[in-house]
Image (tube, helix red, strand yellow):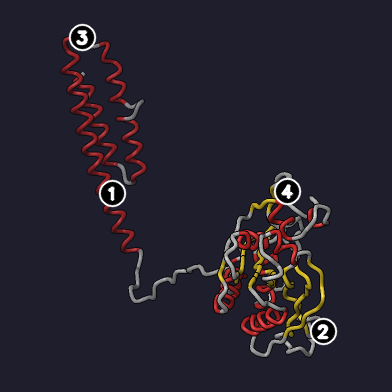
Amino acid sequence: MKEKLAAIKAEALKQIEASDALEKLNDVKVNFLGKKGELTAVLKSMKEVAPEDRPKVGQLVNETREQIEEVLEQARVRMERAAREMQMKAEVIDVTLPAKRNHTGHRHPNTIAMEEVERIFIGMGYEVVEGPEVETDYYNFEALNIPADHPAKDEQDTFYINGDFLLRTQTSGTQVHVMEKGKLPIRMIAPGRVFRSDEVDATHSPSFHQIEGLVIDKHITFADLKGTLAEFARELFGEDTKVKFRPHHFNFTEPSAEVDVSCFKCGGSGCRFCKGSGWIEILGCGMVHPNVLRMSGIDPEEYTGFAFGIGLERIALLKYEIDDMRLLYENDVRFLKQF
């Protein structure tokens, strides 16, 4: 048995010496020390050795294994050092070259537009309030003077979770939550994501963002609404921007209006951007309906107010001259890095 172990050791050392790559060293290790290696086979044949000789034979096997492992490790270290030296000679590093610039991220166009709108209204003394995206039917519709048979409550237009809960279609429900607290006066905006069952195209999406505004106080008139929105338009689109109010209908305001701004591309003379009209629609507004005030516990004989709603994506599309709303959601770096 001693002669056999000596022969195994000699053959292993011979193969290690002949190895010129780490892969070949690994093959030697597997052939001699692996589960099916020659030393392992010797251990498996221990049952053929006399019981009194087994301790001595086991010691010889372990000594042989340790000697082979030691030579293998020395060869591995030597080869790795040689490979590293060759790599260092082959690779030339010019330490005077400028480092690669990190490509850091930045705010999304929607976020930029939202922060600018918030900055304008905060400068006017407004408070930014957030509300739940999963809302009750009452706060999303009924408390806003929208009756049960209104078309907006059709399941083809609204994502209902069940009869009582839905994904909010507008952030106006946040205004009702604030009004119910009874802390007057109120001057707030409510930005957030809303959901409607719309087909995806260049100007529509089932998920988008709104910024709703609300003012409740004594002696608030339509003149206050016009002055506020005119100042907002000038801050957002430029000092020369003019506003135009067109009569409209919203259930939760009376009277109601759509608001247009003079085209900031052509100054109102007419261009492709404003479709030749000189005006661009940006939001809807109106005086808060007395029914909405009553349902929130506010006396319409003592308090009045106005509300308005802005589509954030529309502001971003207009301000940055983006033709397709889908670009805002596709996460295309080529598009986003322009901002």
How far apart are labels 1 and 3 at the CA level? 42 Å
Instruction: Using the image, determine if residue 234 lies above or below residue 217.
Output: below
Observer-side mark, 4 or 1, equals 4
Instruction: Tell which of 136 and 326 is nearer to you.
Output: 136
Left or right? Give the position of 258 relative to 81.
right
Which corner quadrant holds the N terminus? top left
How far apart are labels 1 and 2 at the CA level? 77 Å
How far apart are labels 4 and 3 at the CA level? 83 Å
Q: Secondary structure at mark 2?
A: loop
Contact between labelled residues 2 and 1, with CB atoms less than 8 Å apart: no
Q: Which of disc 1 and disc 4 is earlier in sequence? A: 1
Q: Which of disc 2 and disc 4 is earlier in sequence? A: 4
Residue 53 at x, y = what percent? 17, 13
Crowdedness near tag 4: few (<14), some (14–19) or many (≥20) residues, C-alpha within 10 Å? some
Name the residue located 30 percent from the left edge and 18 percent from the top edge: 44
Which of the 4 image quarters holds residue 197? bottom right
Q: Which residue is mark 3?
A: 50
Q: Which residue is mark 4?
A: 160
Q: Amino acid at mark 1?
A: Met
Q: Is residue 236 visible?
A: yes
Observer-side mark, 3 or 2, equals 2
Q: Which residue is mark 2?
A: 276
Q: Which residue is mark 1?
A: 79
Crowdedness near tag 1: few (<14), some (14–19) or many (≥20) residues, C-alpha within 10 Å? some
Instruction: Tell which of 36 and 204 is nearer to you.
Output: 204
